[in-house]
Image: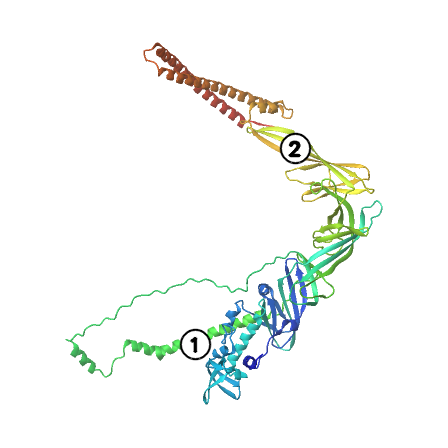
Amino acid sequence: MSATSNCLLAAGLALACSMTVGAEPQSGADRLPLERVALFTSGVGFFQHTGKVTDDAMVEMKFPAADVNDLLKSMVLEDLDGGSVSTVSYASRDPITKTLGTFAVNLTDNPSLGQIIGRLRGEKVELDAANRMAGTIVGVERRTVPAGEKQTVEKEFLTLLTAGGLRTLALDAITEIRLVDKRLQGELEKALAVLALGHDNDKKSVVLQFTGKGQRNVRVGYVQESPLWKTSYRLVLDEPAAGEQRTKARLQGWAIVENTTDQDWKDVRMSLVSGRPISFTMDLYQPLYVPRPRVVPELYASLLPQVYGQDLVDAEREFGRAEGKGRPAESPLAAKASRIAGGGGGGKEADKGAAKQENETSDTRRRAQQAKDMFSAAESIRSLAAGENLGELFRYEIERPVTIDRQRSAMLPIVAEGVEVEKVAIYDERVLAKHPLAGLRLVNSTKLNLMQGPLTVFEAGGYAGDSRVEDMAPGSERLLSYAIDLDVEVNPRTQSQADEMLAVKIVKGTLVVTRKATRKKVFEIKNSGSKPVKMLVEHPRDGGNWKLVAPEKTAETTRDRYRFAVLAEPGKPATLEVVEEQPGEQRIALSNIDAGQIGIFVQSKVPSQRVKDALGQVLAKKRGIEEIVRTKQEKEREIQVVEQEQNRLRQNMGNLDRNNELYLKYVRKMTEQEDRVDVLRKEITVLIQKEQAARRELDDFLQQLELD
């Protein structure tokens, strides 16, 4: 590095650090170490720091920018020994360039030393060069100076107004510059501090201010986004006794915890909370502004001042009256101004105003004291949760302090106890049609809630398979499957059966038929192994009012499954028959069914004789209506035939002379046909009336029909 660069560096450091720095906030990692971590399965973690402060103290903590919203939503601060929390200040969300632009010394564009001094024009400084001097900055200029025989360089020169006049110095000849204005010095230091924070763009500074006397214990807690802690289990099975399905097993449960933060967890108290508490995020960090309507003031055009001519006739009289006055009369405006300035009335109003202001000040003091008393009563916040059960949650407390370095993970033991299991084979046709799954019934005989997670089963000293555990409360049971049982084979068959008619009745012209649908499922089981196997056959539990008929009882019933227990002996076939029935009701309007359908019900043995007789009457009436309709249709067809014949005759007549004998024959024939059509139309009209009457009679009969 050149001598010029060294000089500029020294001068810049002196300019930034010449003022004595006041008390700075101390790092939270040093003053308030992390003491406790509680991780939740809702994707958040609670972090608690504990430490000591003395008198009025400020503690600085840094957080990722993405976590500031959670911090603003959840941070809890406690001063436990009589102190209080003053304020919590945090860095703005505005870009660093915008923040730098708010300081008196703008460092936004990474200025050089000459540019910084140029921005301080008019400020007083003290500097060390060949001699010590003080003065006011006039400006900085660049000059080209020789740097050898044929070379030139540009140098910056500072012009200073001193007591002796203007002085110009090369910047590289200055070793130290000190600002005389302490306020400006502080602004420069704050701008440099913001630049230092900007080196870690993802970090935001939060300063906690504690107020009190003496040394005190303080505590800070907050919720932040955290990876879900996970569980995994190992189950080691013992060999059951001969002829027994139940056996003992050893259950190990491990919690998988990840420290994705930027701080080491050293000797922290770890809590793992299972459950699903409601957790959400809200943008509290972003400044929010309420839009307001813009109102434009109304503008009125002013009139131009008018000039009026003097009345010359009365001019002398006006001047005479003016000279006769001892003194000019006080104008109404002047009198009004006098009263406002200090008359007796004005003094009283002023006294009233002062009294009103004093009363308002007293009210303000009283409200402030009430607010102070209210917050003093709640200086220390105590946890409301104690023990292991937290409402809808369950907490695992790790007994020993835990240490996990940043960006590292760890497995922590949470369960290591003996449990009771029963070996079973679980068959579900929809999962695997040919073989059942080797499984077991796990009883949570521990006093702990078991959170869902994978489970690895070990049997006979080796790996047996994997399973998955759902959330289990103490004392609850779960079926687990971990392998395919190839020794047992199942053949499922479905036997179809026709629906059975149970009852027939008539309600206001509607035939109500009660039927029963039956379905049957047969499971043929063969055990090719050497040991008896307890089978649990799962059968769908459908809706639609299907009722289980056989077997009469189930081993278990879930929301959507029946479970039937079957013991499959070695070499012996076993059979399970599942029969279900579904009663149903069919409603048929008698006015809409034909005679053939009615005949089926009349011939059936299920309807009563009264119902059959009524159906017989309905059948007779319907057949009468059908006969009328058939006759009417025949006459309509006859009319269509006649009309077709007449069309043919008209075409032939168009080619004949009107006096032709054949033409006259066609005329006579068409006359006869017209007479026949008239007769048919009258008969059809009568038939339509008969049909309508018969249908009304049938409808009236059906409406009055009520038979079981």
Q: Can you name the residue that lies furthest to the top here?
A: 661
Task: From this view, report whether residue 369 is shown above or below residue 245.
Answer: below
Q: Residue 614: percent from the left, percent from the top? A: 58, 23
Disc 2, SS: strand
Quadrant including the N terminus: bottom right
Q: Is residue 682 visible?
A: no
The answer to which quarter of the image holds residue 603 is top right
Residue placed under numbered mark 1 in the picture: 354
Q: Is residue 598 visible?
A: yes
Name the side, left or right, on which 367 lies relative to 334. Answer: right
Report the front residue among 336 and 582: 582
Q: Residue 324: percent from the left, percent from the top? A: 20, 82
Quadrant including the C terminus: top right
The answer to which quarter of the image holds residue 406 is bottom right
What label sits on residue 517 in the rendered view?
2
Of pointers 1 and 2, the one earlier in the residue sequence: 1
Report the front residue among 594 and 572: 572
Task: From this view, report whether residue 434 is shown above or below residue 196.
Answer: above
Q: CA distance from mark 1 to mark 2?
A: 96 Å
Q: Can you name the residue that lies furthest to the front here?
A: 150
